[in-house]
Each structure stands twice: as structure tokens, then as C-alpha cells.
Image: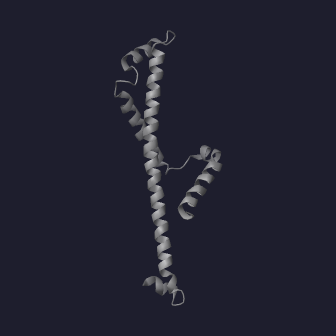
């Protein structure tokens, strides 16, 4: 094939090995990218739902407090807690989709201050990723 002509007769035997290694590398990169996307989606949905439910519980608790402002009591009486309503799911999943879109827009990377702060952990993560991929 074309690779054999590029490598020449002396190294033509390495053509299949090179092609297999390149194919495995491309497939691995695609698999890890897909896995990051799936993890970001799940984390976004779970985190958004958790934030919405905690915000609703906090609002409900503040609504029963005597020191809470009148507008907080009015909102809390209309919203109630997360139980028995679909508002927490609607708000939570909307937050989750927003979080996923932010992750997608950033390419699943951290922005400057966090990337510098978490650099040691990122290095460990990349090392573990490559170790799991290539050394097992």
C-alpha cells in the first residue's frame, strides 16, 4: 500500500503496526472525549437538580422565619418546598443544561484561576488517564 512505499522495502513490515497504533490512538482520544461529555452531562444534571432543591428548601426555611423580609415569605408561600412539585426538576434541569453548555463551550477545561490552582490535581488526572489507557 501507500504506507509501504513511503516506508520503503526495508521498513515495510512496520506499516501494519504503525496503522494499528495510530488507529488505537485516535479511537482512544475519541472514547475519552465522549466519556468527558457524558460525565459533564450527568454532573450538570445532578448538580443543577441538587442546587435547585437546596435553594427551594432554603427558601422554604426562610419563609417560616419571623425575621425574613415580606417578599421572601410571599415567594416561599407560593413556591413551597421541593416535595410535591415539579419546579425543582424544571429549575434544576435548566441549570444543568446551562452548566453543560458552559462546559462544552470551554472544551471541558478549567479557566485561568482554577487551572493554576488545581494544576497538581490536573497533572494527576492526566497521568491516571494515560496510565489507564496505555499501560493496562
Q: Quadrant of residue 83?
A: top left
Q: Judge whether 12 appears above or below 101 on screen.
A: below
**Residue farthest along the top direction in this orientation:** 66
Residue that appears at 39% across and 36% down? 94
Residue that appears at 56% across and 46% down? 111
The image position of residue 109, as x and y in percent, is 53, 50
The image position of residue 11, as x and y in percent, is 53, 86
Q: Quadrant of the C terminus?
A: bottom right
Q: Which of the two residues, 118 or 15, is positioned nearer the viewer here?
A: 15
Q: How many marks?
A: 0
Q: Judge whether 18 appears above or below 7 on screen.
A: above
The image position of residue 10, as x and y in percent, is 54, 90
The image position of residue 56, as x and y in percent, is 43, 24
**Residue farthest along the bottom direction in this orientation:** 9
Q: Quadrant of the N terminus?
A: bottom left
Q: Judge whether 7 appears above or below 124 on screen.
A: below
Colour convention = one colour
Residue that appears at 36% across and 28% down? 87
Residue that appears at 65% across and 49% down? 120
Amino acid at each position: 500500500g501507500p504506507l509501504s512505499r513511503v516506508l520503503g522495502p526495508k521498513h515495510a513490515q512496520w506499516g501494519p503496526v504503525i496503522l494499528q497504533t495510530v488507529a488505537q490512538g485516535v479511537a482512544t482520544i475519541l472514547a475519552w472525549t465522549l466519556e468527558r461529555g457524558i460525565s459533564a452531562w450527568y454532573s450538570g444534571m445532578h448538580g443543577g437538580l441538587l442546587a435547585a432543591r437546596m435553594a427551594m428548601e432554603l427558601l422554604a426555611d426562610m419563609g417560616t422565619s419571623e425575621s425574613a423580609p415580606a417578599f421572601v415569605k410571599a415567594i416561599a408561600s407560593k413556591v413551597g418546598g421541593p416535595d410535591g412539585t415539579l419546579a425543582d426538576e424544571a429549575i434544576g434541569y435548566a441549570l444543568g443544561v446551562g452548566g453543560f453548555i458552559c462546559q462544552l463551550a470551554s472544551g471541558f477545561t478549567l479557566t485561568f484561576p482554577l487551572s493554576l490552582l488545581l494544576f497538581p490535581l490536573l497533572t494527576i488526572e492526566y497521568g491516571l488517564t494515560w496510565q489507564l489507557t496505555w499501560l493496562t
